[in-house]
Image (tube, rainbow, N blue to C red):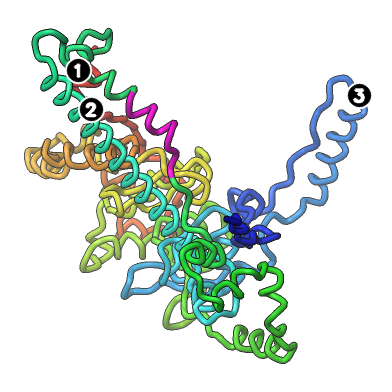
Amino acid sequence: MEATEPLLQPSEPPPRPPPRPNYGKIHAKPFPVIIYPLPTLIPHNPLSIFHIAFTYLYRLLAPPSSHPKVLYPAYFSLETRSVHVTDETAVRALWEHGFFGKGSLSRSEPSWLDREKKKRGLIANETSEEFTAQRRAERRRFKQERARKEREAIEEKLKEERRLHQNDCMAEPTARSKYEGLNGGPVDSLAESIESLFEQQPLSPPMPPPIMLSLSEAANDTNSGKEDCISRTPSELATSYPSKPLEQDLEAEAEAAAIENQEHLQLNPSEAFFLVYALGILQILAHNTSAPLLPETLFTLFRQHSYFPPREIQDLQPDDPFLLQYVVYHHFRSLGWVVRPGIKFAVDWLLYLRGPVFSHAEFAIVVLPAYTHPYWRSTQELQKLTKKKESKSWWWLHCVNRVQSQVRKSLVICYVEVPPPRAVPTLAERKASVSEPNIGQVLKQYKVRELTLKRWTPNRERD
């Protein structure tokens, strides 16, 4: 009886998915400004000292510009109480250099236009949302496969114990007693068997491409039509179809250019004010008059709209929500952290070491006011008011801490020491003074204290 010939294997490997973007190059700058560092000092090379001195003097006499020639435009939306950036260049610059804001139609990175083009078949690049969905699907399959193998290992052990126990209960010790006689006990024996099972039976690879599926199906099928399709290699299949004409490529490019981007970058007030006041690269325009708003005007406007409904200027307080949130945001941005909103995890801010495309957030920040100044204890009414604002229940603390421990983040409580009202100029003082209040002098009155919490698990941390 003659042996059957093996199925023809494809001469070329299946096509790989498009490579991921080089995020290290795209997000190389921590801020959307240009930095001009001095040359490196080489101790064994005396000429490096003259190079540093020449560069320093040249930049001192003719300093280069670190900001863009035209400030990035934006406008404040009263309906959403956020700042919208619609310029394409500004959107990419703010996101790629510092991870500021989020796409209004995306999870984080503004990628609605790329997703729309891929939906119409105009591009083949994968977006961050698709990478996240693939990673979650792979993680789900891995957990299901691991649970199945553990369940099979436990069932095999139980069957072996019952079989040995039924054969000879008195003459021979049962399988369970054998395992209990080991150093580690039955639990360690079961763990070793599970590990050996994983080593012998590795996880199955992900689903292969359709060309490989047809090979596996043809092993049990004698249909001549299928065999004719299988006998072709991927290169032959590719050449069997006519190439796309140049006219279709031009039509696809024209269709992609005709798609209007309906997404904009959305900044919260803290991010927008940091870009305006600290970096000076954003220009927020009034929604009605399209006139640029000064930082002092934005400072008051954001304080008003941090309440709902917005308060009048005379009703503003030193513990306004915007002031507390911005002080913490400015504090951690100055330390080099990438600060992102943390409403997804029931906190105020999330701290990333480099950015959300590189790693998960390491710390979750909760902002609380602290009334340590003697002014807040001068009267009983102020004491009752501050105690009500400071007090949080243990139920709240345990809930927030449990959420952060489940997502592998460290909870940090930031206490912002609130100054007395005289530290923040009132409306009457502003009218009496000729110039607007100095924002830097106001922010210096606030101090930040950090307290890191960790969930204590008795069975893991008994020492």
Give the residue type that dot 1 points to: Ala
Marks 1 and 2, how far apart in space?
Answer: 9 Å
Measured along the vertical axis of the image, is residue 151 above or below residue 64?
above
Give the mark nearer the N terminus: 2 vs 3.
3
- Residue at disc 3, secondary structure: loop
Marks 2 and 3, how far apart in space?
Answer: 74 Å
| Residue 167 in picture, x, y percent from top left | 14, 20
Q: Which residue is tagged 3?
A: 46
How many discs appear? 3
Task: Decide whether residue 195 is among the magenta residues.
Answer: yes
For the C terminus, the image quarter is: top left
| Residue 367 in picture, x, y percent from top left | 29, 43
Give the mark nearer the N terminus: 1 vs 2.
2
Give the residue type that dot 3 points to: Pro
Q: Which residue is tagged 1?
A: 175
The magenta segment = 193-203
Q: Which residue is tagged 2?
A: 157
Q: Is residue 232 left or right of residue 461?
A: right
Residue 295 in view: no
Residue contact between numbered discs 1 and 2, judged by CB atoms under 8 Å: yes
Q: Residue at x 28, y 41 (%)?
A: 147
Q: Residue furthest right?
A: 47
